Structures are given as C-alpha cells and as structure tokens.
Amino acid sequence: MTVRLARPEDCHAVNDMMVRLIDEIYGRESEEIRRVLKANFTEGALTELCGEEHAVLYVVEVEGRVVAFLYGWFFRYVLTIYWIYSLREFRGKGVVRDLLNHAETELRAKGCWKLEMYAYAENNRFLDFCAKLGFTKGVLIEKSMFGFKIQNIFKVLEEPDAEKRETRIKIVGEAGQGVKLLSYTLAQILSQLGREVSLSLAYDASVRGGTISADLIYSIQAIENPVIDEADVLIKFTRTRDWFPAKTLVIDESMCREASVSCSLQSNKGTMYGFEDVAVSLFGSKIYINMIALGRILRHIGINILLLNIKDILPERAIEKNLEAIKYGFSYRDDV
C-alpha cells in the first residue's frame, strides 16, 4: 500500500470514488443536491484542482489501483479536509488512518498546526471513527447554512503562535463598489463557521467617489488588535498611491492596462483577476464586483461554498444575480 500525492492520471479513479461517496453519504438528500456536488468534482475539475496552489489531493494505491483519496485545502498553516473516502472492500484495513497520518506528517513539516473537517452531522459512525483518531467536535452548523447540518471537527497538532492564529484581510475600494457589503457578508460567514471576527471600516473625507477600506481579521481566539499593519491577503479595487504591505495581493487587472503605482504594491505574490471586466461582461454592471470578489476570497482562504446558503445574509434586491456572481468568483460548477 502506497500513499502519495495524486497525479492527473489518477483523477478518473478519484472521480469514480467521489460519485460513490456522494451517493453514499448524501443518500438522504435530494437528487439536485447530489447533482450539484458531483458537478463540482468531475474528472476535468479534479485535474484542474491538482494544479491549484493550495489544493491537496492524496491517494492510496494498492497493486496499481487507486483505492482511496483525501482532498483538502492548505491555507495559513491549516489543512481543511473536504473529502476523504475509501472503497468498501478496503475499509477496516487502516487505509483512512494511513491517509490522515501521511497528510499530517507531510504538512506538519510545512508548519501545519491543525487539521479540520466539516462532516455530515448525521454520520455518527464517521464522527466516532474520527474521535478515535484524535479529532474533537467544534461548532455545529445548523441546516440554514448549508441545507443540512454540518459538524466541524478538528485535530490540533501543535499550539499555534500569534502569526498562525490570525488571518488578516485588507480590502480597498471606492464608494459604490460594495466594499461594505462584501466585508460584512464575509465576516458573517466566518462568524457562523465558528471564527472570532473583527471588522473595521474606514472612509476618506469625500462623501461621493472617495475610497473605503476594510480591515477584516478572523482568528481561533479573541482578537486583541483590530488594526492591520500587514495583510495576509490584500484585495484592491481602486488606483491609489497608498502603499500597504501584504503577503498576497489580488488586484483588478483592468487597473493595470497603463502604468500605475497601484500595480507595484509590496507583496510576496500578486494575483491578477479582472473583477470589473467580468462584472460588466457577464453580469451587466460593475455593482457585482464585490460579489465576484467574495467568491474569489472564499476560495483563496479555503471556505468551501458548496451548498452554502447565504440568502439570509444578502440583500433581497438582485439576490439571485449576487449568488451567481459569488459562485462565478469561486469557479463554481453547477452546470456541468
């Protein structure tokens, strides 16, 4: 038995197991729920995911056959396990245990301090099994959030230092771009997922056409300082001469068609993403910039939006288009 990182040629077998997993675990849910889940993990989608910076996909191979897999997202020293599965004939043989141990060993060397999962709350057998592996129950997410009850479980590998406990997101935009709605919605989602959240908004002196910025911090414990000196993620929608340090910079590519100081902010890594162009070309208005960006942020920080029900959080006006924009930003696939 060999545990290893998946290769593109493994994705056909992983997709086959993903279909079995969804039918088995979500058998009580509607056919539409199962269809949406399956659509997001086709063979092609899994092949793309193998190339994602934060994606983690391990498989177990026995005599040349892939018999189990673990798929998750490694961001800010935490591995969030989205799916873990073994074929029935290999259960009770330590396959899942070996998968978890392999992931834990490899990612601990990269600074990982916690493994977490969001498991189907009705699956008591799986939850009991995970408890034997050292996982503890966290927040119970009620049905209104995902469409069914989800139980957070986690395993702490080591006590995190201050740098690992918090994630700091800085959002800079102009009045009218929906920065306030974006930041409030993101804060509420993180809060419902059991995080401590701090949100501070700052406006310049102009009432119209001025800049607005949001400092959003989420943590596993109470937040002492709500002000961000250096962002882990910087989202920037506007040209400005303001300099702000960030580990990762996400900017609107339409702002860089001509020389601009906005494209030279200090960052360890920059990601170009055309929020404005997409909002206009696909959704008909720049007002959807914020929701496209929200989907992109959720993907980047590892919050799985599959079946995430946030209608109660969003304003009633244009709610369906806002949801479509969030899904697009996340690269959501519900029409495959």
Image (tube, rainbow, N blue to C red):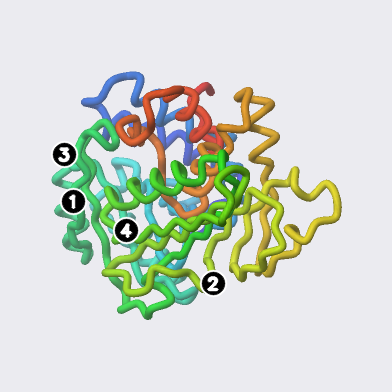
Going from N to C along the chain, the mark reached first, 3 or 1, is 3
Label 1 secondary element: helix
Going from N to C along the chain, the mark reached first, 3 or 2, is 3
Q: Say if 310 sits above or below 319 in the image.
A: below
Mark 4 highlights which residue? 116
Question: Which is nearer the eye, 286 or 49?
Answer: 286
Image location (x, y in percent) of residue 234: 57, 59
Report, in whole angstroms, how far the alpha carbon at label 2 lies from the one at label 1.
Answer: 38 Å
Residue density around tag 4, few if under 14, some if 14–19, many if 20 or more, within 10 Å = many
Image location (x, y in percent) of residue 233: 54, 61
Mark 3 highlights which residue? 122
Report, in whole angstroms, how far the alpha carbon at label 3 lies from the one at label 4.
Answer: 17 Å
Q: Quadrant of the N terminus?
A: bottom left
At label 4, the amino acid type is Glu
Report, in whole angstroms, how far the alpha carbon at label 2 lies from the one at label 4.
Answer: 26 Å
Mark 2 highlights which residue? 230
At label 3, the amino acid type is Glu
